[in-house]
Amino acid sequence: MSKTALITGVTGQDGAYLSEYLLKKGYIVHGIKRRASMFNTDRIDHIYQDPHLEQRNFILHYGDMTDSMNITRIVQEVQPDEIYNLAAMSHVKVSFDTPEYTANADGIGTLRLLEAVRLLGLANKSRVYQASTSELFGLVQEVPQKETTPFYPRSPYGVAKMYAYWITVNYREAYHIHASNGILFNHESPIRGETFLTRKVTRALSRIAMGVQDKLFVGNLSGHRDWGHAKDYIRAMFLIVQQDEPSDYVIATGVTTTIRDFIKKAAAEIGLEIGFRGEGTEEKGYIVSVDEKRFTELVGNEYLEGIKNKISSKTNIVGVDKAYFRPTEVDMLIGDATKARTRLGWEPRYDLAALITDMMQGDVKLVKKEVYLKKGDFYTPNYFE
Ligand code: NAP
Ligand code: G4F
């Protein structure tokens, strides 16, 4: 008999990869999506199934983590073997603008889901995975961070997720629900939201390379992050839920990189060498040289002249805008995933170089499409943030 999984946040980066992964394993996958005024299912359109089909293994429900009755009804209808709670207002900077909503969706939302499992008598049936985060470590008390490192969240998002972490532990201990936290460090991919740092960079560099954007504005360039690939991290989620005993696991690569170095490495992927000059808000990034062979192969000969002009005119292509600074920042994240490696047998398959290759290839392709549409005088959206 096929297992049934319920995924909240199915339209997000992780929800999309996890849905695909579980469908391949023969699961029936139910996902909760929010009502939006436009289609917001880009990441799962390739696995979407027409509701008129008689047999479906991928079923979407409208819902919201802030609506208890809706969550309870969906859990009752689906009777899931496994629940992956991935839904969240997941942007740290935005959580300072919407702190109450973030607490409601990310913190109390998790309680709503666990309480639904308990009230419906599913404590022995439905296993729960909670999407916890390295943001819990915030102002880090230990380097590297592991499961026993004390938490010190530094944003409304981190604080909301801390409630979610502990309520998951509490429902496990109080009601014997098979509920586990995956304390996942930053994980990225070509379908990462465009306003997170890595995707903002790979998208902007591709657009700058092809002359459709002049400059990339960022905030703090000196922060360190432990970046992995989302495809590796959703495998870890699955493994956590399959264990006989529920527990909490750090999932990380163990390698940390500054934002400045991420920009340099992403540019190098398409043959551009970037140098930085200045300090603080006056720091600026320039193209110092171009590997013509690499650039021509990966981006296109027709854009080479534009790059050479930027080099000779010393045009700065990266600037700092303090609008992207956070009131309190998390400066250094680096995880120790020894427990996951030994107990789950989990190993990341992508290193940072492979992640960057995947992301740059994805964005170069998308920008080529954008340029093609512009040339044909078709509408192209001009999203910036
Ligand atoms: P994401 O791309 O931002 O996706 C978040 C998902 O949650 C989207 O489907 C979103 O729907 C949905 N959502 C937001 N608010 C909701 C609400 N009130 N009710 C129902 N659904 C709601 O995030 P992600 O990167 O896939 O991350 C998945 C989870 O892991 C999140 O909980 C995040 O906090 C956590 N996490 C992520 C990372 C990371 O580096 N990616 C690391 C640690 C933990 P829309 O599509 O409609 O916006
Ligand atoms: O890409 P970010 O916005 O990710 P952040 O804040 O680390 O949060 C992500 O990872 C967490 C796990 O640790 C998740 F829980 C969370 O849901 C989310 O997925 O920022 C990364 C770093 C920060 O230090 C930020 O200050 O990049 C810095 N940064 C510098 N300029 C920027 C920018 N971040 C963004 N988003 N945009 C900028 O322009």
Image: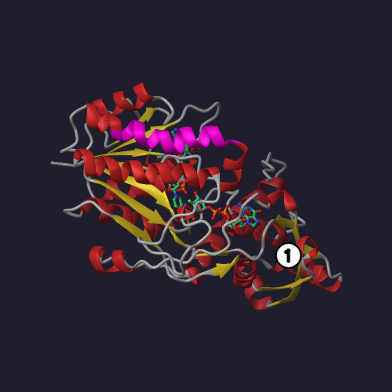
Which quadrant holds residue 107?
top left
Colour mapping used in the image: secondary structure
Query: Where residue 279 appears, x then y in whole percent?
Result: 77, 68
Query: Where residue 373 appears, x then y in whole percent?
Result: 66, 46
The amino acid sitting under disc 1 is: Tyr
Which quadrant holds residue 30?
top left
Foreground of the two, 99 or 131? 99
Give the main secondary structure of the magenta stretch: helix
Q: Quadrant of the N terminus?
A: top left
Residue 325 is covered by the magenta coloring = no
Q: Residue at x 27, y 37 (%)?
A: 57
Q: Residue at x 20, y 38 (%)?
A: 175
Q: Is residue 305 above or below residue 156?
A: below
Q: Secondary structure at mark 1?
A: helix
Which quadrant holds residue 301?
bottom right
Query: Is residue 54 visible in this depiction of the protein?
Result: no
| Residue with the mark numbered 1 | 303
As drawn, is 226 to the left or to the right of 297? left
Query: Where residue 130 appears, x then y in whole percent?
Result: 34, 45
Q: Residue at x 43, y 29 (%)?
A: 64
Q: Residue at x 56, y 37 (%)?
A: 99
Residue 107 is covered by the magenta coloring = yes
Taking the image as four quarters, which one is ligand 2 found in?
bottom right
Residues drawn in magenta? 98-114
Q: Is residue 8 above or below residue 320?
A: above
